[in-house]
Every structure is written in C-alpha cells, then in structure tokens.
Image: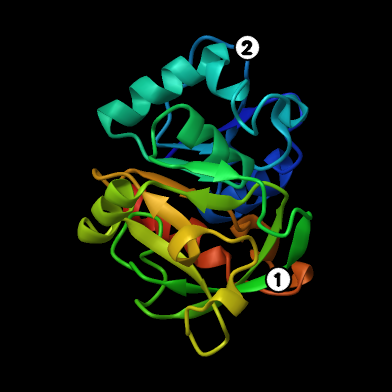
Amino acid sequence: MPATVIVFPGSNCDRDVAVALESAFSRPPAMVWHRDSALPPSDLIVIPGGFSYGDYLRSGAMAANSPIMAEVVRAAERGVPVLGICNGFQILTEAQLLPGVLMRNAGLKFVCRDIELRVDRADTLFTGGYRRGQVIRIPVAHHDGNYFAADDTLKRLRDNSQIVFRYCDRDGNVSAEANPNGSRDNIAGIVNERGNVLGMMPHPERLADMALGGIDGSPMFTALAGALAA
C-alpha cells in the first residue's frame, strides 16, 4: 500500500502527515517534489498543509500548476484516492478536482486552535473509522479557510452527499458560532462525486498520536490503510 506525499516550497505539514501515514501503513510514504513530472506507484496521494509558494496570488493557485499536479489529476481521474489537507484542500479546488473556492476567513484573521467537527459521512474511504454524526476534535490553522460555492454547486454538494465534515459545537450542533472562518453551510471537508478525492481544512495529522494531545485524527489514516488493504 504505497502512499505518496507531494511537497511544495512552503509546505510545512509534509513531515507531520508522513509520520501519521507511516504509523498507519507500516511503511514510510514517498516524498515527491513539486517539480517532478512522474509519480511512483501510489495507492494514496496526500497534498499536505502549509503555504505553498507563500500563498501568492491565491492560496494554492500556483501550486495547482506545478508539474506534478498534472500527474495527480490524472491519478485522481483513474480513481486513486487523493487527500488534501488545509493548503492541500485549496490546491485541490484550484486544480478543479473539487468544486468551490477557499477565501479569506470572514474575521480576516489567522485562526489556529482546536475545533469540533461533525462527521456527516462515515462511508467514504477516508472516514470509515468514524461514525456518522460523531463529533471529533481536530486543529485548524489557516487564514484562507472560508469555503464558498455558488448556490447551484452547494445544492449539488448537498444532494450528492458530498459534504463530509461540518464545523459544529461539542454537541454536534451546526451554527454560526461554531464556524471559525465563515464557510458556507459550515463546510469543513468535501469529497468529489466519485468519492476518491477529499479536501478538508482541519489537520487530522496534528491529532494522530497521544503525544500530540489526542488521537481523533488517527482513524482517518487507519481507515485508509484498512480500505486500501482490502
């Protein structure tokens, strides 16, 4: 079950996610530089968080045009699972692998803290380790995490059950008060229609070991390992 992590100039969570993947997959992932033009054999591709290209132009816009992203898009179209976390989510939208855009936070400030997420789908490759409706604690760290989609796109996301995570309170209630960045419908993570591409703003790799203060992120990586081994 080889996994691959794409590394851009400005990535700062590539090592974190590599540690989480090695723990779940029992082997280290390949670390692929953005200028490479070929992917190694990969059962999973992860685009980590950070500030690729310093977030110039728009967050993720320059990274989406890196040479390796053409291969990531082709792999996703073949059905290879792709996980984008924080800046990775931004890159996936800029590469048009996921709908919508990530804009400046509604409060115009960088948000860095633990938040609650409600798992709205537990039947994807990425979320099989959770229960539908489960509330988990995962850190966020972003300045441009405000998810926006036009009304027709938002309707499709709802109708197709593509919304995987929503910001919520500790009781699972979705509200404006529980929304850290102004995202429409409190969206924290979505999948494509095929279900093999997930983008999410919170960082599961930052709570994937008790040494980090919690393990609510760990089931994502163990579920992926189990699903890909099946």
Q: Residues within 10 Å of mark 1 (few under 14, many from 20)?
A: some
Left or right for 214, reference 155: right
At a point 50% along the width and 30% down the height, the residue shown is: 94
Q: Are marks 2 and 1 in contact (CB under 8 Å)?
A: no
Query: Residue under circle 2?
Result: 35
Question: Hey, which quadrant is residue 87 in on the image?
Answer: top right
Nearer to me, 152 or 99: 152
Nearer to me, 40 or 5: 5
Query: Residue under circle 1?
Result: 114
In the rendered image, the vertical position of residue 224 relative to residue 44, given as above or below: below
At a point 68% along the width and 66% down the height, the residue shown is: 209
- The picture places residue 37, in percent across and down from the top left corner, at 52, 9
Which of label 2 and label 1 is nearer to you? Answer: 1
> Which type of secondary structure does the marked residue at label 2 adopt?
loop
Residue extending farthest bottom: 171
Distance, label 2 to label 1, CA atoms, is 33 Å
